[in-house]
Amino acid sequence: MNILIMGLGLIGASIAKTLKKNTKHHVMGFNRTRSVTLRALDEKVIDESGELEELLPRADITIINFYPQAIVPFVKEHAHLFKKNSIVTDSCGIKTKICRALQAENFDFYFIGAHPMAGREVSGYDNSLDNLFDSASFICTPVEGTPRNKTDALVGLAQEMGFARTVVTTPEHHDEMIAFTSQIAHVLACSYVLSPLAPQHAGYSAGSYRDVSRVARINADMWTELFIDNKEPLVREIDDLVSNLMKFKYCIVNGDSKQLHSLMEQGNKIKEEIG
């Protein structure tokens, strides 16, 4: 197949590298910054580049790796160029807003939302890897009416690439789960390091500090869009987190060692059961 990678940053270039490493597909690439495209060609991360008018009509699968708010406008603007009956997908961390907006359009291609569940605390082409997805999940979010063979084709490509697990679900369920497994962790980490004591951590910190604070190293531009576009599920998770924190605070303030012990035992039990 001809596979077009739109955007050669951390995720896009890692997808291209993984495709070149693990599959025989022809990989085309396009990046707004021409110097990045030329590097990808020189390093054989992609087989071919060119103008969008040349690439989009030939792509059997187009993978768009843009910030959330840029995806829908790009697809609509270039709808006349995508190959008929081809698959257009993305790698964005939220799905409902994007998938439902594009579902309303009458395209002659198939948009299927996707989310390769991997990343790093650093960004850009220079930090891309050909093994970034080795232990990762690939989540696919087709909307109602998407032909099964198109979804199967996208899932099959993920399996060829070497993703450890593939999941097919609705855009809405994806977003509520990502609010819990990813977004609330970033909110917590950023909130944690806003403590006035954080600059003094050296000499006092070890594994617990590293584990909780790691994902505070964040791309604020991108995550601002992700948080706001997934507002309702994320706010529910924040409410639950605040409620649980207040339970701990109440026990500590009131010296309720029995209830405090029970809360920690409950947390420990849940973590042992779910991993």
Image: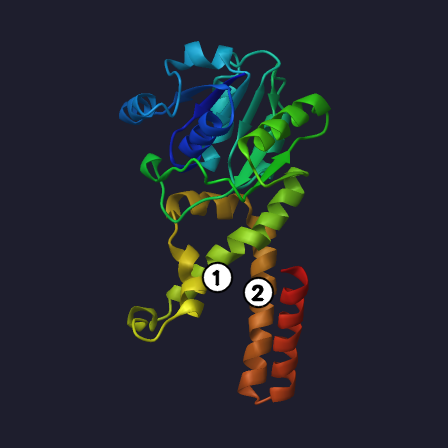
**Residue 262 placement (x, y as % from top left):** 66, 80
At 41% across and 15% down in the image, what residue appears?
52
* Three-letter code, disc 2: Leu
Toward which corner of the image does residue 237 lie, by quadrant? bottom right
Q: Is residue 251 visible to the viewer in this orientation of the structure? A: yes
> Quick check: 4 left or right of 251?
left
The residue shown at (38%, 26%) is 45
Label 2 residue SS:
helix
Kindly tell me whether residue 65 is visible in this rendering.
no
Residue receiving disc 1: 188
Neighbours of disc 2 within 10 Å: few (<14), some (14-19), many (20+): some
Q: Residue at x 55, y 35 (%)?
A: 162
In x, y percent, where is residue 27?
45, 20
Give residue 90's mark.
Answer: none
The kind of residue on which mark 1 rests is Leu
Q: Nearer the viewer, residue 248 or 44?
A: 44
Kindly give the residue lying farthest to the left in the view shown: 35
Q: SS at mark 1?
A: helix
* Residue in the image at 34% along x and 34% along y: 125
Callout 1: 10 Å neighbours few (<14), some, many (20+)?
some
* Direction bottom: furthest residue: 255
The location of residue 35, given as percent across then percent down, is 27, 25
Vertical arrangement, residue 206 with respect to residue 18, above or below:
below
Quadrant of the image occupied by residue 99: top right
Quadrant of the rendering where the N terminus is positioned: top right
Rendered-image quadrant of the C terminus = bottom right
Q: Name the disc covering residue 241, or none.
A: 2
Discs 1, 2 touching: Cβ within 8 Å: yes
Q: How many marks?
A: 2
Residue 79 image position (x, y, % from top left): 53, 16
Q: CA distance from mark 1 to mark 2?
A: 9 Å
Depth check: 68 or 134 in front? 134
